[in-house]
Image: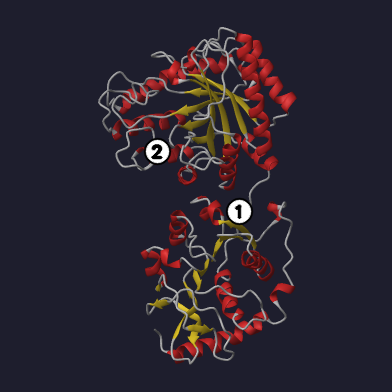
């Protein structure tokens, strides 16, 4: 412990400053702020307040105090709704209100707070769970124990507290005590309010009343934290502005985020939120402008006439909306693709959606039309910038009247204002006679580029030259239809460039980073030479992102990651 007299001197010095700051009641004269709905006009830093129970009087009073005292916008959320990685990225500072010893926040929250350099005000419980790195950085060690001997915040007025909820010790540096808590006879003390770097720490639950003798300690800790706010948060765009920017994007660089349902997840979410947050952050940090989501429906075999949602495989609109909101908070545009797959139990070997040709086409089209129109309404409601109305339905693409009518209904009946497209398989361009009805044509660009494993870079580049000739011929025959390589990727296995469309291109299932790396290098060179390609969508983000030894499509944590990042920044 620091000697008590040095503690008393700190009390005298800071107490006088705090009394000056709180005179006239800080809660009585709030700073004028714009309405919540006018986000673009809000110039204030955005503070996230985390609490176990946002409905508690303490939590509501804390947010009122922050918004009244400082030029900022404080938002209160329950700790169960903290979005790992994402909230740490999009907010300018954080306040944790530890009211309940038995309800700590998530491990991901502790990890984010230990790593952030943004201002952090930590109040009361659970600071002991911060990482060792955080303790070293702050010079503060917090213990998981309650010490009732400390009952006063300053020696002028022996204001009774319920006791210091946490006792703490400090290294010699860099932590600075703003307030000490003393025992009744002033023979022992413990830090009550501490600042070190970006962390301001209050070791007890304060009374949020400016007239209470203990209030200056809380005020000093909050002032120390909020005075560090120097960065203004980039304000989120409204739907109309974001849509205009998306339409003006000359090269739509994106990464696919497959939706993986999690049977152990909350029923209202249906996926592993922390995993999706991590993967969204990987996408954001890659430099991508777009994230490509899918909503997959299923039917029993290629001749079935009733594609339908599946509880174990179809993303609900509520779950998709969560992800869309997260993506928009990160500044990403969103594309939603409607996919029809075959149920595994009914699928014959080698069958896939490209072979779908229903026994009752009218029934199939009536069902599919409802699916797409529902997706268009949802997309319009949540501000999705691009909708792909189908993917790789090779044998259904010949139904030109049905596709044209569907595109017309999406625009006129639903009023969807985003970019409309369709994804054609690389071997099925001939039947796209209705492509002129679309804003773009996406290609599932899984052309085989070699005949043997580990092909040379020159071999891959030569293969792309042939592909480029075919794309040029198609574009000349269909002027005004932008072409995107909307889905493309390579596994980390031998024969990845031979069978790029396969998760298992070879029986060996061995790791091969070189072939994936060279395949992306060849793609990069091809796109650098082709200003007529309107975008690229990398099939990159999977639940195995950055897993050592992963042999799947993810390039993250592998040599190919740097090439993918260059592709995302190709024409920005």
Seen at 59% across and 8% down, the residue is 360
Residue 316 locus on image (x, y percent): 58, 34
Seen at 52% across and 10% down, the residue is 303
Q: In the rendered view, tell whether residue 328 sits above or below residue 510.
A: below
Q: In the rendered view, tell whether residue 46 sits above or below residue 243.
A: below
Which element carries disc 2, helix, strand or loop? helix
* Left or right: where 132 falls relative to 438: left
Seen at 56% across and 7% down, the residue is 359
Q: How is the image coloured?
A: secondary structure
Q: Which mark is first along the chain, 1 or 2?
A: 1
Is 281 or 445 nearer to us in this picture?
281
* Left or right: where 125 falls relative to 169: right
Residue 27 locus on image (x, y percent): 70, 73
Instruction: Report crowding for label 2: few under 14, some 14 to 19, many 20 or more residues within 10 A (C-alpha).
Output: many
Quarter of the figure with residue 459: top left
Q: Which residue is mark 1?
A: 234
Badge count: 2
Which element carries disc 1, helix, strand or loop? loop
Quarter of the figure with residue 412: top right
Quarter of the figure with residue 466: top left
Q: Which residue is mark 2?
A: 563
Residue 270's tag is none
Residue 353 locus on image (x, y percent): 49, 17
Q: Are marks 2 and 1 in contact (CB under 8 Å)?
A: no
């Amino acid at each position: 412990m620091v000697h008590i007299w040095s503690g008393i001197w700190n009390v005298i010095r800071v107490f006088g400053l705090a009394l000056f700051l709180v005179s006239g009641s800080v809660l009585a004269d709030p700073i004028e702020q714009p309405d919540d709905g006018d986000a673009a006009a809000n110039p204030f830093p955005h503070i996230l307040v985390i609490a176990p129970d946002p409905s508690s009087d303490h939590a509501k009073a804390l947010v009122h105090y922050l918004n009244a005292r400082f030029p900022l916008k404080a938002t209160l959320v329950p700790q169960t709704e903290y979005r790992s990685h994402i909230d740490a990225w999009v907010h300018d500072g954080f306040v944790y209100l530890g009211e309940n010893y038995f309800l700590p926040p998530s491990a991901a929250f502790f990890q984010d707070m230990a790593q952030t350099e943004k201002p952090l005000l930590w109040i009361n419980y659970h600071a002991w769970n911060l990482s060792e790195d955080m303790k070293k950085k702050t010079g503060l060690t917090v213990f998981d124990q309650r010490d009732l001997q400390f009952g006063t915040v300053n020696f002028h007025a022996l204001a009774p507290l319920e006791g210091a909820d946490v006792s703490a010790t400090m290294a010699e540096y860099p932590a600075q005590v703003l307030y000490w808590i003393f025992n009744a006879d002033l023979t022992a003390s413990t830090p009550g309010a501490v600042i070190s770097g970006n962390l301001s720490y209050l070791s007890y639950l304060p009374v949020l009343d400016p007239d209470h003798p203990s209030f200056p300690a809380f005020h000093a800790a909050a002032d120390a934290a909020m005075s560090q706010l120097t960065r203004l948060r980039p304000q989120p765009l409204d739907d109309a502005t974001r849509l205009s920017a998306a339409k003006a994007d000359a090269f739509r660089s994106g990464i696919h985020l497959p939706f993986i349902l999690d049977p152990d997840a909350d029923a209202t979410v249906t996926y592993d939120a922390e995993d999706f947050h991590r993967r969204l952050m990987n996408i954001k940090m890659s430099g991508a402008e777009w994230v490509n989501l899918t909503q997959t429906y299923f039917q029993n075999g290629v001749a079935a006439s009733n594609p339908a949602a599946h509880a174990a495989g179809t993303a609900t609109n509520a779950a998709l909306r969560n992800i869309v909101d997260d993506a928009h908070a990160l500044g990403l545009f969103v594309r939603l693709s409607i996919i029809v797959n075959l149920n595994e139990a009914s699928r014959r070997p080698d069958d896939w959606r490209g072979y779908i040709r229903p026994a009752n086409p009218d029934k199939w089209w009536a069902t599919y039309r409802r699916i797409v129109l529902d997706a268009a309404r949802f997309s319009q409601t949540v501000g999705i910038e691009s909708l792909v109305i189908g993917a790789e339905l090779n044998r259904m693409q010949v139904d030109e009247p049905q596709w044209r009518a569907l595109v017309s209904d999406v625009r006129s009946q639903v009023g969807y204002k985003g970019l409309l497209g369709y994804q054609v398989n690389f071997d099925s361009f001939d039947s796209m006679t209705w492509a002129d009805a679309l804003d773009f044509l996406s290609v599932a660009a899984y052309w085989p580029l070699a005949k043997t494993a580990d092909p040379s870079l020159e071999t891959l580049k030569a293969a792309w030259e042939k592909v480029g000739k075919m794309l040029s011929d198609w574009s000349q025959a269909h002027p005004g239809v932008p072409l995107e390589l909307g889905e493309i990727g390579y596994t980390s296995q031998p024969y990845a460039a031979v069978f790029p469309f396969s998760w298992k291109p070879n029986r060996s299932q061995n790791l091969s980073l070189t072939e994936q790396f060279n395949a992306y290098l060849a793609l990069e060179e091809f796109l650098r030479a082709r200003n007529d390609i309107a975008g690229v969508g990398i099939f990159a983000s999977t639940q195995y992102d950055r897993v050592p030894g992963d042999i799947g499509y993810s390039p993250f944590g592998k040599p190919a990651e740097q090439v993918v990042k260059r592709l995302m920044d190709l024409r920005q």
